[in-house]
């Protein structure tokens, strides 16, 4: 690999900075909780604990810790989603995308049950930043929808979805939003008991899913804590509610059978009830150590992630199409470090440093088990955050971040050249709280360098070195009518540098079963956004809503061209102006008391409308969704039934097919035998009770791979 001298110098400087900051906390001190103090102290954030009282109080009781400055959820200037404790135990699935699919404004790529990333307001891939405890997942899930994200919902203590000013602090790739999976692998407090154990065991019938995860924290002294965790997940092929292929593709396959007498076409049309090639097995182990005092903390952790999974097959329905059954073998080894320093007065209230390094590889396997294509990446990311001491109504923070990734694809279907990305950013967020008003401003400068070697067939036109400087900013304000109701407005202008995958892809990709073509001449993507939010709560009710409009310039998208190359459909990346607008709304209302509990109703809705100017609909945009539920909540028992209705999506891009609407009916029960604070709880649920054939429009494989059919689930959560 050939690098510019500037890139090499940047690396040396960043490594030196990282080493210096990591050395500081050995002498300095800070709060053991940092910005997580309030949230971590809440019983609702402890695995296995009961969050009954927090849920009764509503979302306005939650503190959002993603971002430098902890923010009360009711003061957020954009849509926010939080899953913790019982809600998380009920929602957890093998992939992060499926785990979050009931959060307002969130859909999923649904590339099979194992490889499903979140889709935020119609944006996915490079525009959605996945974090593990504040640092990027350092995998290649952003490069392609068949690549699983190396974040483990089974070990999550809390998951937050964040958009708006503070999401800019995590990089230009967070233009769609941030998903932060908080796992506490690096200890942040000293347990009161000699040993603290948390565990979850689960079973799901749709894929014969068997899962278990456990974490243990042991205080060695009053300052030193060691942590260990592990998880195991195994599934069979996913059961579905009908045929694998849509009616139109089934007819196409049958017509091809009539023309060619090839039995494969008839076999493809007949696949029903089970989605082949979707079985998986994943296991993880991790360990961490923390040094914590009243004024300081330092921690280090190691984790290993190993997964073997299949992705749904893009079945051949025409004679000129290829058909493969890709399976992926994925391994990541990762090291994380955290340090926090309290300067003990002065301009700064806290100095925090977070660092992650990962060595990742995955193999796309041939039917005989041989390696067809290999993906290798080594990456590291570091963040230095300086929180200002509060001065009257004014508070704020600033800092810097770096990210370095070396990425290589080897094999017959290496669709992307060997490349390296180096990125450095500076950011700040400032707040003023004046009476009923809250004002917030954020800014980020970022420089990105991308260097790549040409693929053999690109050498004559290839520009393998690109650099981009971007500047993003936001300004917002919120007015509190009283302690329970407010309304806010946020304006932002963001810029995003194209990723190596968008610039340099050019070739067949077995995992997605597509021929992918990028454009090395792309310019930066820019967006201007406005968002209106409101939060309200009162005795027995809560309400949140947001409406947004975004104007993109040079929006990068990939669209199917209708051509077939190497037996695969061609997806060509392009740039054009685009317009996105939509809304999210959710609320709950207590109806009446029943014994020791409360009967309540709740609901949510979300919608995104997206257009490429002069062309038409943006591909893979989720349609209107409405969900309503009726529940009974008490200290020992929760019961809930819900109906989720998703509209058809017939506003489609060229060569994109419409997606039929569907209605799902779900039910669940949560049992806490010993009431509030129970060390043991059980969750029983029935999902898609009527075995409906449901397909997500955001999925590349929606016409070949429906969602899960009827799924009966049971899980046990322990904490002692």
Image (cartoon, rainbow, N blue to C red):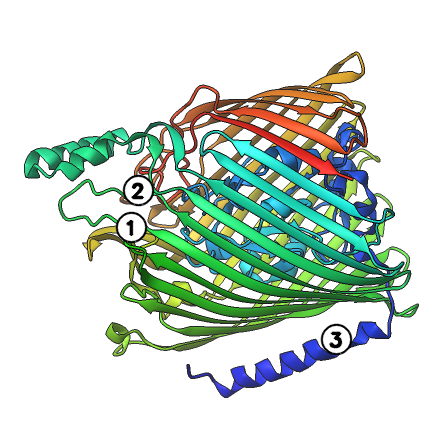
Relative placement, left or right, of 229 versus 464 is right
Residue 292 shown left or right of residue 97 in the figure: right
Q: Quadrant of residue 74?
A: top right
Please give left or right for residue 261 compared with residue 600 in the image.
left
- Asked if one can make out residue 473 in the rendered structure from this viewpoint, the answer is no
Residue 451 lies in quadrant: bottom left
Q: CA distance from mark 1 to mark 2?
A: 7 Å
Residue 21: image tag = 3
Q: Position of residue 446 (x, y in %)?
A: 59, 70
Q: Contact, CB < 8 Å: mark 1 with mark 2?
A: yes
Please tell me which residue lies in front, 550 or 535.
535
Q: Secondary structure at mark 1?
A: strand
Cα–Cα gap, marks 3 and 1: 47 Å
Q: Earlier in the sequence, mark 3 or mark 1?
A: 3
Say which label, 1 or 2, has the lower sequence index.
1
The front one of 196 and 17 is 196
Residue drawn at point x = 29 percent, y = 32 percent: 246
Disc 3 and disc 2 in contact, CB within 8 angstroms: no
- Residue that carries the numbered disc 1 in the rendered image: 560
Q: CA distance from mark 3 to mark 2?
A: 50 Å
- Work out which quarter of the rendered image holds the C terminus and state it: top right
Residue 318's disc is none
Q: Residues within 10 Å of mark 2 (few under 14, many from 20)?
A: some
Q: Residue at x 27, y 32 (%)?
A: 271
Corner quadrant of residue 154? top right
């Amino acid at each position: 690999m050939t690098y510019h001298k500037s890139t090499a110098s940047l690396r040396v400087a960043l490594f030196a900075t990282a080493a210096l900051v990591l050395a500081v906390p050995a002498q300095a001190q800070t709060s053991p909780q940092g910005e997580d103090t309030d949230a971590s102290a809440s019983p609702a954030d402890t695995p296995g604990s009961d969050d009954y009282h927090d849920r009764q109080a509503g979302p306005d009781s939650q503190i959002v810790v993603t971002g430098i400055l902890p923010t009360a959820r009711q003061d957020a200037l954009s849509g926010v989603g939080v899953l913790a404790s019982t809600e998380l135990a009920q929602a957890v699935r093998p992939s992060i995308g499926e785990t979050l699919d009931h959060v307002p404004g969130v859909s999923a790529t649904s590339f099979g049950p194992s490889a499903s990333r979140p889709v935020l307001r119609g944006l996915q891939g490079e525009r959605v930043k996945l974090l593990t405890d504040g640092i990027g997942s350092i995998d290649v899930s952003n490069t392609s929808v068949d690549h699983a994200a190396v974040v483990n919902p089974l070990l999550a203590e809390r998951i937050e979805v964040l958009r708006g000013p503070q999401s800019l602090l995590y990089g230009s790739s967070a233009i769609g939003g941030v998903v932060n999976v908080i796992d506490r692998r690096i200890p942040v407090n000293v347990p009161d008991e000699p040993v603290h154990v948390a565990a979850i065991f689960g079973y799901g019938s749709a894929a014969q899913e068997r899962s278990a995860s456990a974490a243990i924290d042991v205080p060695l002294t009053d300052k030193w804590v060691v942590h260990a965790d592990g998880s195991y997940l195994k599934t069979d092929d996913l059961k579905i509610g009908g045929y694998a292929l849509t009616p139109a593709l089934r007819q196409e396959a049958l017509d091809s059978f009539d023309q060619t007498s090839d039995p494969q076409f008839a076999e493809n049309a007949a696949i029903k009830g089970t989605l082949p090639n979707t079985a998986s097995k994943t296991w993880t182990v991790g360990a961490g150590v923390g040094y914590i005092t009243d004024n300081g903390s330092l921690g280090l952790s190691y984790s290993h992630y190993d997964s073997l999974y299949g992705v749904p097959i893009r079945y051949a329905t025409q004679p000129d199409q290829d058909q493969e059954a890709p399976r992926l073998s994925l391994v990541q080894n990762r090291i994380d470090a955290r340090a926090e320093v309290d300067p003990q007065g002065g301009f700064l209230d806290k100095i925090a440093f977070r660092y992650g390094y990962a060595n990742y590889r995955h193999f796309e396997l041939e039917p005989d088990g041989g390696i067809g294509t290999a993906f290798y990446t080594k990456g590291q990311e570091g963040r230095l955050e300086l929180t200002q001491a509060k001065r009257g109504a004014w508070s704020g923070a600033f800092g810097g971040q770096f990210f370095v990734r070396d990425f290589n694809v080897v094999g017959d279907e290496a669709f992307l050249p060997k490349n390296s990305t180096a990125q450095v950013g500076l950011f700040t967020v400032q707040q003023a709280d004046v009476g009923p008003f809250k004002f917030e401003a954020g800014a980020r400068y970022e420089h990105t360098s991308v260097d790549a070697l040409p693929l053999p067939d690109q050498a004559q036109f290839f520009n393998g070195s690109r650099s981009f400087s971007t500047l993003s900013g936001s300004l917002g304000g919120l007015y509190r009518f009283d302690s329970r109701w407010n309304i806010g407005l946020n304006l932002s202008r963001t810029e995003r540098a194209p990723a190596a995958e968008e610039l340099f892809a050019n070739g067949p990709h077995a995992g997605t079963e597509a021929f992918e073509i990028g454009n090395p001449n792309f310019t930066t993507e820019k967006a201007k956004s406005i968002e209106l939010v409101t939060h309200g709560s009162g005795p027995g009710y809560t309400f949140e809503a947001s409406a947004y409009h975004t104007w993109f310039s040079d929006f990068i998208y990939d669209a199917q061209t209708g051509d077939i190359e190497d037996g695969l459909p061609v997806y060509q990346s392009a740039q054009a102006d685009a317009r996105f607008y939509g809304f999210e709304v959710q609320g709950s209302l207590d109806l009446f008391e029943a014994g020791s509990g409360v009967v309540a109703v709740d609901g949510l809705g979300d919608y995104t409308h997206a257009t490429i100017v002069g062309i038409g609909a943006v591909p893979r945009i989720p349609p209107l969704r409405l969900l309503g539920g009726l529940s009974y909540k008490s200290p020992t028992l929760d019961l809930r039934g819900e109906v989720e209705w998703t509209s058809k999506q017939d506003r489609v891009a060229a060569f994109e097919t419409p997606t039929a609407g569907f209605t799902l009916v779900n039910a669940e029960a949560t049992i806490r035998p010993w009431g509030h604070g129970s060390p043991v709880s059980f969750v029983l649920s029935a999902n898609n009770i009527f075995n409906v054939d449901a397909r997500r429009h955001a999925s590349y494989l929606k016409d070949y791979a429906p969602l899960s059919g009827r799924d009966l689930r049971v899980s046990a959560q322990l904490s002692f």
